[in-house]
């Protein structure tokens, strides 16, 4: 017996189109996944070759593909930008120091030339920092789902606004400082509810936030309070620290302690801190996603004294 379907032809056409669309979506996802893996691999090659500007390009493309980055991808992106901006921050400090020395000698001719070169470095710094902030606001933060990712990216946002505040002046400095504080505060709110006190990302956040208070807001009391609280909270739960994050966490705890020693010493109170004595930030991103340390601030990276 032959059974004839009473369903209209449009029904079959519609379902065939749905199946075709599903196949097309799967193909596109496969293409995106392949592209993501290829770009990430190229970024790793760039890291090995120390070609960080290209590494930034590849990881920025990965970030813009959409979706939440893996821990590895997140750290690669952070390391790339950290190195690109880090060399320029170091250059800016050196040139600024030379400029101050020449000013003290009254060498106006040299000071003018040095100032022009410093302006050039500042323009490069501003461009890199704004590039990072655009990627964070447009791709990374909106796609962050886990507590770790949210803290990591908001901390990163605070760090790069802090870098802008380091060399800016007037309204631009105040704007960068306000934006940095808001980002660090957002990261702290999430960290305190979703990450343990010994988590390397939470410790790295406390490290860099305290550096921000000390160096940008000129508030040593708040800097010391924040750093000491983070250190004490971590010490209280040190026994529960996992083997996996032990090295990263204890490294950042050491940076916190070093900064506290620096900030509470009589030298730190009686004299200006020189670039060589600057607080430490988190600068090398641990596998668990820590980031910077500067007097000793932390970036996926803890950052060494800068």
Image (spheres, grey):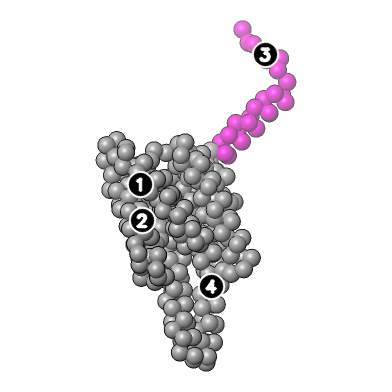
User: Extreme top residue here?
Assistant: 1
Residue 80 sits above or below residue 237 on the image: below
Q: Tell which of 274 and 281 is nearer to you.
A: 274
Question: Residues under labels 3 and 1: Cα distance?
Answer: 77 Å
Q: Report whether residue 242 is seen.
A: no
Which comes sooner in the sequence, label 2 or label 3?
3
Q: Main secondary structure of the magenta part?
A: helix
- Describe the element under mark 1 as helix, strand or loop: helix
Residue at 63%, 31% in the rendered image: 18
Residue 133 spot, x, y in % from top left: 56, 57
Which comes sooner in the sequence, label 4 or label 3?
3
- Say the numbered circle drawn on residue 138: none
Q: Which residue is mark 3?
A: 4
| Contact check, label 2 and label 3, Cβ < 8 Å | no
Q: Which residues are magenta?
A: 1-25
Q: Quadrant of the C terminus?
A: bottom left
- Say the numbered circle drawn on residue 122: 4
- Say the numbered circle drawn on residue 260: 2
Which comes sooner in the sequence, label 3 or label 1?
3
Question: Residues under labels 1 and 2: Cα distance?
Answer: 10 Å
Question: Residues under labels 4 and 3: Cα distance?
Answer: 77 Å
Residue 39 spot, x, y in % from top left: 45, 55
- Say the numbered circle drawn on residue 231: 1
Which comes sooner in the sequence, label 1 or label 4?
4
Residue 132 spot, x, y in % from top left: 53, 58
Q: Tell which of 81 and 295 is nearer to you.
A: 295
Residue 160 sits above or below residue 13 on the image: below
């Amino acid at each position: 017996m032959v059974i004839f379907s009473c369903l209209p032809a449009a029904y079959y056409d519609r379902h065939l189109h749905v199946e075709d669309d599903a196949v097309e979506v799967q193909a596109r996802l496969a293409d995106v996944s392949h592209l993501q893996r290829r770009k990430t691999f190229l970024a790793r090659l760039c890291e090995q070759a120390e070609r960080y500007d290209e590494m930034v390009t590849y990881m920025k493309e990965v970030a813009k593909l959409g979706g939440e980055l893996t821990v590895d991808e997140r750290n690669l992106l952070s390391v790339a930008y950290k190195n690109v901006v880090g060399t320029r921050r170091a250059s800016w400090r050196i040139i600024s120091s030379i400029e101050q020395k020449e000013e003290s000698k009254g060498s106006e001719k040299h000071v003018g030339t040095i100032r022009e070169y410093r302006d050039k470095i500042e323009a490069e710094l501003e461009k890199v920092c704004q590039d990072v902030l655009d990627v964070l606001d447009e791709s990374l933060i909106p796609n962050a789902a886990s507590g770790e990712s949210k803290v990591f990216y908001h901390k990163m946002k605070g760090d790069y606004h802090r870098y802008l505040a380091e060399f800016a002046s007037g309204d631009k400095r105040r704007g960068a400082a306000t934006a940095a504080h808001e980002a660090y505060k957002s990261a702290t709110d999430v960290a305190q509810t979703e990450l343990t006190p010994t988590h390397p990302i939470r410790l790295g956040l406390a490290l860099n936030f305290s550096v921000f208070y000390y160096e940008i807001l000129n508030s040593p009391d708040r800097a010391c309070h924040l750093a000491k609280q983070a250190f004490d909270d971590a010490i209280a739960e040190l026994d529960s620290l996992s083997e996996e994050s032990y090295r990263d966490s204890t490294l950042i705890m050491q940076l916190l302690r070093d900064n506290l020693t620096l900030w509470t010493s009589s030298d730190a109170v009686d004299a200006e801190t020189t670039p060589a004595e600057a607080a430490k930030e988190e600068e090398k991103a641990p596998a668990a996603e820590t980031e910077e340390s500067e007097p000793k601030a932390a970036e996926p990276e803890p950052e060494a004294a800068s």
